[in-house]
Image (cartoon, rainbow, N blue to C red):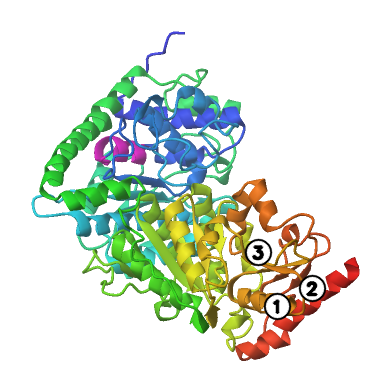
Amino acid sequence: MSVPSIDQSIEQLSINTIRTLSIDAVQAARSGHPGTPMALAPVCYLLWNDVLQFDPVAPLWPVRDRFVLSCGHASMLLYSLLHLAGVEEVDKQGNSLGKPAISLDQIRNFRQLGSPCAGHPEHGDAAGIETTTGPLGQGISNSVGMAIAARWCEAHFDRSGYEMFGYNTYALCSDGDLMEGVGAEAASLAGHLKLSNLCWVYDDNHITIEGETSLAFSEDVATRFEGLGWRVTLVEDANDLGALSRAMKVFADNDDSPTLIIVRSIIGFGSPNKANTHGAHGAALGEEEVRLTKESYGWPPDVQFLVPGEVRSHFQEGIGTRGLEARTAWEQRYLEYADQHPELAQQWQTMQAGGLPAGWDAAMPTFEADEKGLASRVTAGKVLNALAEQVPWLLGGSADLAPSTMTFLEGETAFSAGSYGGRNFHFGIREHAMAAACNGMALSKLRPFAGTFFVFTDYMRPSMRLAAIMQLPVIYVLTHDSIGLGEDGPTHQPVEHLSALRAIPGMLVLRPGDANEVAEAYRTVLESAQGPAAMVLSRQAIPTLDRVKYAAARGVSRGAYILGDCAGKPEVILIGTGSELALAVGAFEKLTAEGIRARVVSLPCWELFDLQDAAYREEVLPTEVQARVVVEAAIKHGWEKYLGPQGRFVGMKSFGASAPVRMLYDHFGITVDRIVTEAKVILANES
């Protein structure tokens, strides 16, 4: 079929190509969001073709500028850009696979099974999708982490004459992004840190799904952001390329704060009947309205998915040429840098590959048997510090709780506006932004950790879920993990939280039962790097087991292992985790002394145990032994798969209470004697 000739400037032709690709894809899917791509096509055209330091043939170039579409419902805007820019699909090492990241056929299959053009951008589905967005506020909060990572890399890797490891991060955000609490937390953090390499472009279109934003949103956004320490500039018309270019220069010239560019736009621009209404938000325009809209653009109304050849050439001459030149020049300088600074270059390469330095666990501490022991949070602090000495890009902090979570790295400075090389992060009382920023840091190849009390994962879970979706190796250091925190009472005592985290696919939840299990849990998590991990740790001291008498803690890497056993087939199996493992051991010893053949199993990580082969799982928990007792100071939910039909659970059935620790365990019946009693009841029922 011949391609119709369209008499427009190349800039306008490119902008309208973005618009019509988006309109056609949404219409073909009969679902999606056409309005924002129609409104912001000029913004993204200028940003991508004139500003972004990004090489389409090497989309994983480590120091590329990042572009985050935080308003993920407008996903066709990103897919259109990736297609027109000629972004190539690559493997995990960045090698080209000889095909486009987003083909025209894939755009035609927008929102269909198997197409990388999902309803919301999914990191890993196609090159150029820097993060998974959709839940509003998450993308802009990820972008803060990306900007943090760039500043840290500059401080750690740059040397005189080789200032080359930083980059800029741009995020496109909507009214909803700025209404969400996580976005406000992230904006506050970015302003405090003076991240001048961060630019948010705010689509101020006054429309949400329910109608005009005035229904629920009337604040002065510019004044709010100025109060947060941002530089704010306004573009009155999203179609004014000159004004947009000047706004980008404001960002480029700003070296002491992040920048917010407020862009006034008309949602559904060009649609005769739906522009500037919520009718262009979240639904296809309809075939007749598509025709009318294309006519308003001077576009052939009856041609779908039209990409004029000169538009492809224009992008190739713009971002294609500029990005290639920037990357090749950087790679040449990097060869010189590696020759001058080989140790740093080795660190950079290992970090970018997602690896660990040689001997990274050589200084991992081991712990002698100790009946009193240490809180697992204290042990974890010792282990974390030992690992951080060997892994320079292992860094993080807490939500104003470092003295309690033990997440402070000794001998390291704070990451701050005056010291971007610091490895101790003060995220402030912003749990949600902390988790979201850590996702951005992990996407930038750092190994971040985030610490808080376990109960406050309620404030973090959306970002933790997205870390699992993206398989990001974020470590969550979650202390004060049960009623064992004592007098602070039920508001601070997590009882349902283990179940909630274990329900997230791809999340490793580890609740180590003594000091050596803590060390092995960290070893396992650092080696894995296949997704997020929650280290669930006690406030109270727990015994360090005698590993001469009991099995080595290396079994943690398999999720569960036989800690202590009898001769022959056990009559009953006791299963414990965390601070209750010592109670299971105490019950094991008591039953053994009474002549009952017992086995005690440590099961610190369901997810790892479930990955083991059937033979190993049967070895640890033989099917023929149905007499089982689980002890965990949390609710029972989920344990049924290990307990079986006859098993008994010793744990929580309600919220906790405010009292000293020992009194609470007695009050709720989580004791050695209770475990022994439950075991005997099962055995009596079997006889």
* The stretch drawn in magenta includes residue 38: no
Please identify the quarter of the rendering in which residue 160 is found. Answer: bottom left
Determine the secondary structure under disc 2.
Answer: helix
Q: Please name the residue that numbered disc 1 is placed on.
A: 587
Determine the secondary structure under disc 3.
Answer: helix
Q: Is residue 278 above or below residue 412?
A: above
Q: Is the residue under label 1 in contact with that under label 2 (CB below 8 Å)?
A: yes
Tell me the residue at 34%/68% (across/down). 386
Between marks 3 and 1 in the image, the one whose residue lies nearer the viewer: 1
Q: Which residues are magenta?
A: 42-53
Closer to the chain start, of discs 3 and 2, is 3
The local crowd at label 3, few if under 14, some if 14 to 19, many if 20 or more residues have their Cα within 10 Å, is some
Closer to the chain start, of discs 3 and 1, is 3
Is residue 19 or residue 276 the one in the foreground? 19
x, y percent for residue 402: 40, 77
Between marks 3 and 2 in the image, the one whose residue lies nearer the viewer: 2
Q: Please name the residue that numbered disc 3 is placed on.
A: 499
C-alpha gap between disc 3 and disc 1: 24 Å
Amino acid found under the numbered disc labelled 3: Ser
Tell me the residue at 67%/57% (across/down). 620
Q: Is residue 108 above or below residue 252?
A: above
C-alpha gap between disc 3 and disc 2: 24 Å
Q: Please name the residue that numbered disc 2 is placed on.
A: 679
